[in-house]
Image (spheres, grey):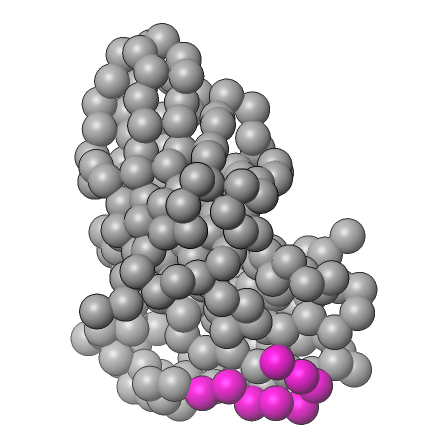
Amino acid sequence: EAQVTQNPRYLITVTGKKLTVTCSQNMNHEYMSWYRQDPGLGLRQIYYSMNVEVTDKGDVPEGYKVSRKEKRNFPLILESPSPNQTSLYFCASSQGQGGYTFGSGTRLTVV
Amino acid sequence: GNSVTQMEGPVTLSEEAFLTINCTYTATGYPSLFWYVQYPGEGLQLLLKATKADDKGSNKGFEATYRKETTSFHLEKGSVQVSDSAVYFCALSRTGGSYIPTFGRGTSLIVHP
């Protein structure tokens, strides 16, 4: 089944403790992206990648890092999480104008 | 820059009512347009798309027509069901080859029996 898999689905962590949210797609898509979803703010793009080793900042990149060493994986790294990064995160992938396939989401709480 | 504006929700309807969710956009060039749906507790799913002016996208009884003259892509359904309750996002793909979408803020639809 074609899908984008994110892990974990739920995560509670403490301020300053580094964490990684993994994202993997099995569709050989070139484009991958991370979004955060917050009430009243809709979806905001954090980072995106147009191919292996090609990444760029989205609208809200501060406090996040990404890497794209392989085509299928696009992890999101929070080096020093803070409470304002409490949010619902989505990974998505696409092969072009056909639209994006989204993962099921990761609900992160930073206390 | 590119932007998408959707009507504010929530939209509350009775079952079998007619649905319209308005979406207008601002973009350079000729973007593709999309509607995504997010059911409670899930990620977004592509509902329908249109890639050029006057194209009509359709799926699951939903339709939207790409109107370049009014820069709109309104979502419609003739008879909604309780199972259509969800958040609907209008989006456009950026021009210039990156295909990175710009999303609207989403419109919540609540359908009562």
Farthest top residue in view: A16
Q: Is residue B3 visible?
A: yes
User: Residue B82 at what x, y percent from top left?
Assistant: 23, 74
Q: Residue at x 36, y 45 (%)?
A: A73
Q: Is residue B57 magenta?
A: yes
Say whether residue B99 is left or right of residue B67. left
Which segment is the magenta one? B51-58
User: Residue B87 at what x, y percent from top left?
Assistant: 38, 60
User: Residue A74 at what x, y percent from top left?
Assistant: 40, 42
Say whether residue A23 is left or right of residue B41. right
Q: Nearer the viewer, residue A18 or B52?
A: A18
Q: Residue at x 45, y 87 (%)?
A: B58
Task: State which quarter of the image contains the C terminus of chain A.
Answer: top left
Q: Quadrant of residue A6?
A: top left
Note whether B82 is above or below B45 in the view shown. below
Q: Is residue A28 magenta?
A: no
Note whether A69 is above or below B47 in the view shown. above
Q: Nearer the viewer, residue B48 or A2?
A: A2
Note whether A56 is above or below A65 in the view shown. below
The number of numbered discs placed on residues in the rendered structure image is 0
Q: Is residue B4 visible?
A: no
Note whether B2 is above or below B111 in the view shown. above
Task: State which quarter of the image contains the N terminus of chain A.
Answer: bottom left
Q: Magenta span: helix, strand or loop, mainly?
A: loop
Q: Residue at x 36, y 51 (%)?
A: A72
User: Residue B26 at what x, y percent from top left?
Assistant: 74, 63
Q: Quadrant of residue B52?
A: bottom right
